[in-house]
Image (spheres, rainbow, N blue to C red):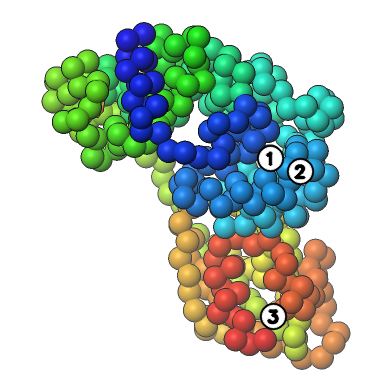
Amino acid sequence: MEISHILQSWYEENRRELPWRDTHDAYRIWLSEVILQQTRVAQGYDYYMRFVKQYPTVGALADASEDDVLKLWQGLGYYSRARNLHKAARQVVGQYGGLFPTRYAELIRLAGIGPYTAAAIASFSANEPVAVVDGNVYRVLARLFDVATPIDSTAGQREFGALADALLDRDHAGRHNQAMMEFGALHCTPTSPRCAECPLAEKCLALAAGTVGERPVKAGRVKVRERHLHYYLMKRGREILVHQRGANDIWQGLWEFPVVEEGAAEALAIKTAPTPPLFTLRHQLTHQTLTCDFHVVEVEGTTADVPAGYEWLTWEEWQKKAVAKPIFMANERFSAFF
Ligand code: SF4
């Protein structure tokens, strides 16, 4: 309990003032948590403000089309988060009459909400005594208790979950969780923890053992897959041929130019003369490295065969579609043609 009290007083003095911090509105807390997963606060801030403005209630978000939600999300990456956001909004309207749930047991059943997000919403909005364990919390715990169990192992998840729970101030669960996370984000940082001026220095076992730099331990990295994509800007006057990506691959529901993947069994049903790429963009996803070659093909006449799922759009109509980052960057280069 003493550790929690020290952390909470540190938090009161050092916390960042953020628009989702002082609300108990579960909808807004959920929005901020989903946006901030894998996103820096500085970038997430703008997106949060835009979402709250466009969709001030969960009902408004549920009424929107998935395309509109994806468009507003554009640039944040990890698009499954946006699709789940939309799905969960519809679940809240369908199952809870638009009143956002605040209990862990209900939250965990909504689309895209895992143990971390459910604990964050339940504790921040209703003070339910459940401990959050995110990357920052793993690091703080691994150092405070000098734990060498890998955080990405099943044993590690169990051990860290139990530690987080034992440390929780059950009467002030929301503030305790915020303090743990903020302390990891601002003070006990991955590469330059400020041990010399740390209020927990006397209690920190990794500091005493000289192992701060080795904590937390990670078991292993996931292999990164290399993919090579050829994109074709099929241009007919001011129109271009585009399609929406399907399920079971990256960027589901986002729009793009016709694409052929090297080594893929399925070829594009459009005949393209071999052309050298106009430019190449590299893009890094969590488990994939993409090399995207962009080609331009002028299409003559008006009767070009349109394969199923493809459509011709004017360059202006195309700008309204939600696209992944490499396509967004290619659009900027291609705009010179229109
Ligand atoms: S002493 Fe250093 S490693 Fe330990 S909690 Fe403080 S900042 Fe983190």
In x, y percent, where is residue 158?
Answer: 43, 15
Q: Which residue is mark 3?
A: 234
Residue 120: image quadrant is top right
| Foreground of the two, 98 or 274 | 98
Q: Residues within 10 Å of mark 2 (few under 14, many from 20)?
A: many
Q: Residues within 10 Å of mark 1 (few under 14, many from 20)?
A: many
Which disc is residue 61 wearing?
Answer: 2
Residue at the image point whose x is 47% and y is 61% from the top? 283
- Viewer-nearest of labels 1 and 3? 1
Tell me, yes or no, whether the two marked residues, 1 and 2, touch with CB atoms within 8 Å. yes
Q: Quadrant of the C terminus?
A: bottom right
Whichever of callouts 1 and 3 sits on the residue coming sooner in the sequence is: 1
In x, y percent, where is residue 210?
Answer: 13, 25
Question: Please, what is the three-letter code of the amino acid marked with disc 3?
Answer: Met
Residue 298: image quadrant is bottom right
Residue at the image point whose x is 62% and y is 42% from the top? 81
